[in-house]
Amino acid sequence: MIFRQFVDDGLGCASYLIGDEDTGEAAIVDPAYWVEQYVDEASHQGVRLTRVLETHTHADHLSGHGRLALEHECPVHIHGAAEAEYRHEPIEDGTTVDIGAISIRTIHTPGHRPEHCAFAVSDNNRSDEPWFVLTGDSLFIGDAARPDLAVEARAGAESLFHSLQRLAELPDGVEVYPGHVAGSLCGVGMSSKASSTIGFERRFNHAMTLANEDDFVEASAGGSQLRPPNMERIVALNRGPFVRSPKPLEPIEGSAEGTILDVRDPDAFAAGHAHGALNVPIDGTSFSTKSAFLLSTDEQISIHASTRDEAERAARGLRAVALLDIAGYALDPPSDEIVAPIELEEVERLLAAGDVEVLDVREKDERDSGYIAGTRNIPYRLLRVCNDCFGEKPVVTICNTGARAAIAASVLQASGVKARPVLHGGIHDWERRGAHTVEFRRCGT
């Protein structure tokens, strides 16, 4: 058997290639839109791609099943409850898809979505017992999927509880390969580990140790986690007609079109950038998700980058979250504007004098755990729709490390607000310096 896991570190999404080297066949499970990685690996392994299996209709990233179907004639298998509008071969609980001597058995595991399935994989040259199970967005390493993206949260949690019970019936030694690792918005407490075993998860995964359905539903349905950006658009694309290959990324001739997304590092952006550009560094964490929170799917995007490789990676990351209208890229962008970063010592002095407004751009739950007195809280992802609510004072943006503060400052500056980010450091460094923070406490706590 040939088996390979692919992980998109920016989105925390995992996909898989399963092949039989004797027959030269291979299947892809939960493909990303960037299918070249699978084509290259199949060529390296000497196999051809013959099938696609989807655990479910994904809500956080654009699938590559359409490209594989159109360009490589791979039939797509998905559960009938997905109500897929594209040409597909429906599967149901117990359906087996064979790849040479490899059997992929469907286990219907609703909860995250009604159509969700896991796939138990056996190498019949060794045994008909499953070797590993691809759990998609049901069982994660250290956690379970969120149940609130497709149906009402409690109904989803009830289904998910029974799905996890089914997976727990697999033998202890069966390896678990999930559809997400840490970094995804589809779960909270998942590990960054790439795999585990059923036995280990049954003993130590809190979602599997809750034997009472009511306790599980109460624990799973009450979260307030962010929904993936562009979710409705991504689901519609993944359920609808096949999405074809993107047009090649080309250099921009003349002035940039649409919204400029500068993907260079924050220091390079601060030193000089095009007027109105937004800054989301390609080498920062969660590039795709942060971009999708800022940009709408109907915006045309021009990429400003330091190198062609940066531009290509940015385009790939944007397309992964259904930001498909990319005009092209430019290298070494003009220095029409600069941003003046600020150090914490100066922030403390200016804040005490009342000369600046300090904007905490973290999420509310982060801020509530400790923030600088007298500061305001607006998460960076909301600033493009509420950037007209600032006065005459300069605005200082701050987060935990500087990453989101840099993005926030670029958004404010693009809208005409004078903003200075704390680029290197943040709230935790403020506390380490001995400066005071306060914690939000609800009544009765």
Image (cartoon, grey):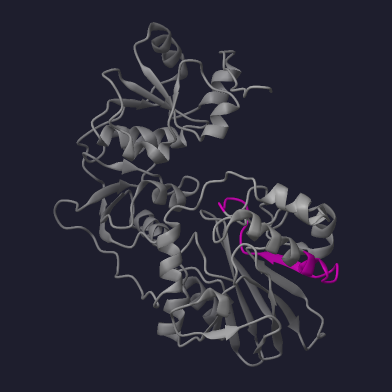
**Where, by quadrant of the figure, is residue 437 drawn?**
top right
Secondary structure mostly seen in magenta is loop
Q: Quadrant of the N terminus?
A: bottom right
Looking at the image, how many numbered discs can be counted on the residues? Answer: 0
Left or right, 106 with respect to 349, comes to: right
In this view, the residue in front, 397 or 2, is 397
Residue 348 in view in this figure: yes
In this view, the residue in front, 21 or 412, is 412
Residue 81 picture location, percent across and down:
56, 76
As drawn, which residue projects farthest toward the top?
353
Residue at image position (38%, 74%) is 243
Let me know if residue 287 is in the magenta part.
Answer: no
| Vertical side of 356 occupied by 385: above or below | below
Q: Quadrant of the C terminus?
A: top right
**Where, by quadrant of the figure, is residue 80 drawn?**
bottom right
Residue 242 picture location, percent across and down:
40, 77
Residue at image position (83%, 56%) is 211
Extent of the magenta region: 165-185
Left or right, 216 with respect to 391, comes to: right
Residue 305 picture location, percent across and down:
32, 49
